[in-house]
Image (cartoon, rainbow, N blue to C red):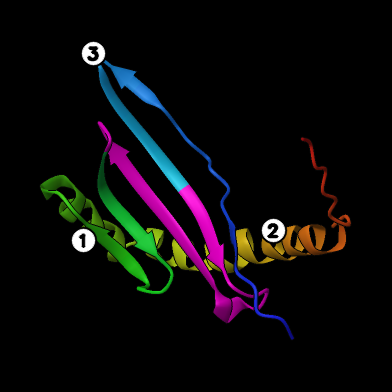
Amino acid sequence: MASFFLRFSLFFITVCTADGFLNYRVSSCEFNSTELNGIEYIYSLYYNKLEIVTFRSSVGKFVGYTAIGEKNAEKWNNGPEVVQRRARKETYCLNNVRIDTESALTKSVEPTVRLHS
């Protein structure tokens, strides 16, 4: 079977601004197969273009990159948020990966080349 790598990202961005400050969140799925073990779910929170906290399904917990991010990661890792994010790999990524992979692989067209002098 031919080896392939596809990257699939769905971005649900929530943007909030107040006095010039910007806050947004990004959810994405990266995969190299349609099987659950070949998929990684990533959820990141940004503040003024700086990633403050992220959840990666391969790590299984939130990791903070700033002081406030570390505080939130500790709180969320001890609450229901971490359980909810762990489930997102299957509920958010798995179905969409299968749909997009099937769509990409079944809707190919024969390539053509045009030469101009």
Q: CA distance from mark 1 to mark 2?
A: 30 Å
Q: Amino acid at mark 3?
A: Asp
Image quarter hosting the N terminus:
bottom right
Instruction: Please state which of the two labelled residues, at mark 3 or mark 1, is closer to the viewer.
Output: 3
The tag earlier along the polypeptide, 3 or 1, is 3
Q: Secondary structure at mark 2?
A: helix
Identity of the residue furthest to the left in this view: 67
Instruction: Please state which of the two labelled residues, at mark 2 or mark 3, is closer to the viewer.
Output: 2
Q: Amino acid at mark 1?
A: Glu
Residue 74, disc: 1
| Residue 17 position within the rendered picture, expressed as x and y whole percent measured from the top left | 33, 20
State yes or no: residue 38 in magenta.
yes
- Which contiguous range is marked in magenta? 27-49
Question: Which sits in the foreground, 114 or 91?
Answer: 114
Residue 51's place in the image compared with 84, above or below, is: above
Instruction: Please state which of the two labelled residues, at mark 1 or mark 2, is closer to the viewer.
Output: 2
Q: Looking at the image, which residue is at 43% across and 69% down?
A: 57
Q: Looking at the image, which residue is at 51% across and 54% down?
A: 28
Mark 2 burial class by Cα count in 10 Å: few <14, some 14-19, many 20+: some
Residue 109, disc: none
Q: Secondary structure at mark 3?
A: loop
Q: Looking at the image, which residue is at 38% across and 35% down?
A: 24
Residue ID for mark 2: 96
Q: Number of marks in the image?
A: 3
| Residue 14 position within the rendered picture, expressed as x and y whole percent measured from the top left | 45, 32
